[in-house]
Image: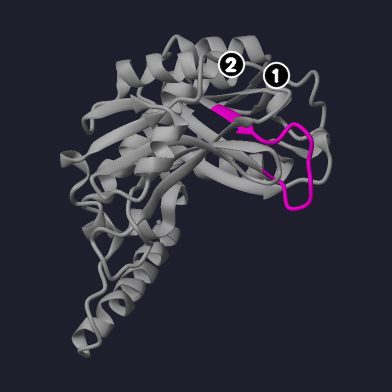
Amino acid sequence: MRARCIKYLIAVVLLTFAVGPEAFGQGRIYTRKARLADFQTKTTKVVLSGDSLLDIALREEVRRRWRISPFEFCDPEDFEALKNDSAYYFLYLSQDKSGLAYLSLLKGGNDDSFRSLEGKLEVVSIPFSPVTITSGREFVYLPALLDIIQFFVEESFTNSATNIFGLSYYNGNLSKARKQKIYIARDDLDADFPERDSIAVIFPGIIATDNFAADSLFDAGCPEALIAFSISPAEPSRGARCFNFIVAADTHDLYYYQSRRYNKPGKRGFSKSAIKSIRREHDYKDEKRKK
């Protein structure tokens, strides 16, 4: 609660600075919330590059799940031709220098100035999978990532703090899910995690399992399960980061989002210290055990 209050105080301060120049006659500066106000009236172009398995999966999941704006599919050539047009938003795959792919949502426009409602704006970018040596698990979590993007956009219409803190705004939500167990695949634990390959119960309410069991719970939408999973490049390069999520299997609500640097493949995933912090926040309440 204290951390959330601090976030709101910082948000208020930052917003005060954002509107300051207008008050002093130096020209209007628009907040991200104001610039996103037209989202639901604009068409979102979903960029597909070809007939890859990823394109097929993305097309299918967008058709099934995208509900917050009109959408159309387009190819990379259309994206290049239209990305400076403020009549469109774009959902597309991007990648960083470390070899990690992201699902990115962009508002089209000629520039990224906060002095224009029609300026280009990166709305949100969420890590999706390594560019090479993929495990296939990303297809299990693709529906959730699309829903997380949509939840984030919807909250951004009314909540200025969401716009300032991005996906990290959702940290602190684990205390709302104390009756649900957290399941994590052992492959998503740091290589130095004690008894990583054999541990079953890390802490009360935090269960270690294999990839198949964790992914199956998620795919089935188990209402009593929160699934912890990690996304990172296959091989670390300078500055590479690993992103850790905890998501509700049934609703796809995001409860935890953190990143950490790693310097070798085995150092990816949830560290022992991260799990201890998650335990303190989650504070699992077993109602059956209480009775």
The mark found on residue 200 in the picture is 1
Q: Nearer the viewer, residue 208 or 50?
A: 50
Height in image: 215 above or below 129? above
Q: Residues within 10 Å of mark 1 (few under 14, many from 20)?
A: some
Q: Give coordinates of residue 31: x percent, y percent.
A: 27, 65
Magenta region includes residue 6:
no
**Up-down relation of residue 229 to residue 256 (above or below):** above
Q: Which residues are magenta?
A: 228-241
Image quarter of residue 152: top left
Amino acid on which disc 2 is placed: Ala
Compared to 26, does 189 lie above or below?
A: above
Q: Which residue is mark 2?
A: 214
Q: Main secondary structure of the magenta part?
A: loop
At horizontal 43% and vertical 13% (from top left) the residue drawn is 222
Indicate which label's residue lies in the foreground, 2 or 1. Answer: 2
Residue 263 makes an appearance in the image: yes
In front of the other: 68 or 205? 68
Give the structural element (helix, strand or loop) at label 2. Answer: helix
* Front residue of 70 and 279: 70
